[in-house]
Amino acid sequence: MDTAAKVDALMDGLRADLERLAAIPSVAFPGFPAEPVREAHDLLVGMLHDVGVERVERIDLPDTAPVIFGEIPPPSPDAPTVLLYSHYDVQPPGDEKLWLSPPFEPTPVEGGLRARGIADDKSNVIAHLGMLRAYEGRPPVGVKIVFEGQEEYGSPFDDYPPSDPERFACDAMVIADLGNLRPGTPTLTTGLRGASEVVVEVRTLQEPRHSGEFGGAAPDALLVLLNALSTLHDVHGDVAVAGLRREEWSGTTYTEDEFRDLAGVCDGVPLTGSGSLGERLWSGPAITVIGLDAPSVEHAASAVVPYARAKLNLRFHPRQDAKEARGLLVDHLRALRPFGVPLTVTPGDTGPGYEASTGGPAYRAALTALREAWGEDASYVATGGSIPLVNGLARAAPDAEVLLFGAQDSMCNLHAPNERVLFSELRNTVVAMCAFVREYAAGFRPGAAS
């Protein structure tokens, strides 16, 4: 078939379906109603049936939204099976006063649409459906479909696939929960940094004491804590915790101007750290103070602070063991005695990173497909974010190649106000998906080593 022409003919319908899906406020966080999540689930089940997926099941696990599982058998015994993943839940909209239009009213923008979740990840759900429509429900590969309903909040489904490996067995999987470095630049993501959290707290006094009478000798908990936090980075802003892995980055990355604009860095403020942006963002560690308990400036009293606490978020190299990385940060903090005061350090959740192997038949097919869709060779990037389910699926199907690409782009404002998706990226992703399954089916050899 003429892939591009076929997809172009489908775009009006795909856009309409994306608008229907994005209008549903399917936020699976506590405190939000469950009905919209179920509504999005039911809409997608209907769309899958309409496109010819006869086997559609619902996976119900405790304390999570339902997972949609669909399956199309391989057209022949020698055809490969591809697992397609995306999620239909979305982030909360946040402060709606910061939106230029209501977050759950899909609104036209130049070249696309604006709405919460329209890029992350409903555009990729529609991209999967678009590929199936282009092949009228009969692609040249077997297909397993996994549409998750609680990815954004965190779900026990992350650890479920290894417990049911037969269900998730496949030769390759396309994890569509990300996209291109910039619009118009086809991008394969090959690494995901791991993530851990650590809480550090200080208690120095039983209660606040007058800063005039006691300050200068009574230990200030906040000063103790700030002294400890200052040891986490060197004079350049690079992480100073010994043993955290850092390597040069050889793939594509942002220009400094692009990154400053994306991050909203204020004029005149330098970026943190040294080395390439890829090294700082993807193949090296990052430690961020994401929370601080201390007296507020507005309600400050002239008193020595007796107690302070901070929550730290650690991002680490895709190939570094998660518990090892967290342990290095914990050991660093526990070894400190700022002004002679010990710290209480509590390890929190940790999740591993992921580094995909490249060079197998699925990657070769993906490179061809992305070039066909965008008209230029694909770039390789990593991401500082994490997708915990990737590791679960990889453990369930350890021999499968894992491909990470999709219809988002780094400038789409995911998790931020005024999230948007571009029709060009959605269209090209559908073309790439169609070309990928075609090329993969043609080049697949059962039992061949990747």
Image: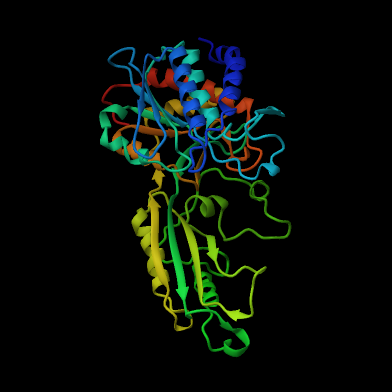
Judging from the image, the colouring scheme is: rainbow
Location of residue 334 with respect to 419 vertically, above or below = below
The image shows residue 400 at horizontal and vertical percentages of 33, 32
Q: How many marks?
A: 0
Quadrant of the rendering where the C terminus is positioned: top left
* Residue drawn at the location 64% of the way across and 80% of the way down: 302
Location of residue 445 with respect to 226 vertically, above or below = above
Relative horizontal placement of residue 80, taking residue 93 as reference (left or right) = left
Q: Nearer the viewer, residue 45 or 357?
A: 45
* Residue drawn at the location 44% of the way across and 57% of the way down: 197
Relative horizontal placement of residue 144, taking residue 219 as reference (left or right) = left
The image shows residue 438 at horizontal and vertical percentages of 43, 17
Q: Nearer the viewer, residue 419 or 150?
A: 150
Relative horizontal placement of residue 108, taking residue 425 as reference (left or right) = right
Q: Nearer the viewer, residue 221 or 120?
A: 221
* Residue drawn at the location 41% of the way across and 64% of the way down: 329
The image shows residue 205 at horizontal and vertical percentages of 48, 81
Q: Is residue 263 visible?
A: yes
* Residue drawn at the location 26% of the way across and 25% of the way down: 447
Image-quadrant location for residue 266 = bottom right
The image shows residue 135 at horizontal and vertical percentages of 46, 12
Q: Is residue 427 visible?
A: no
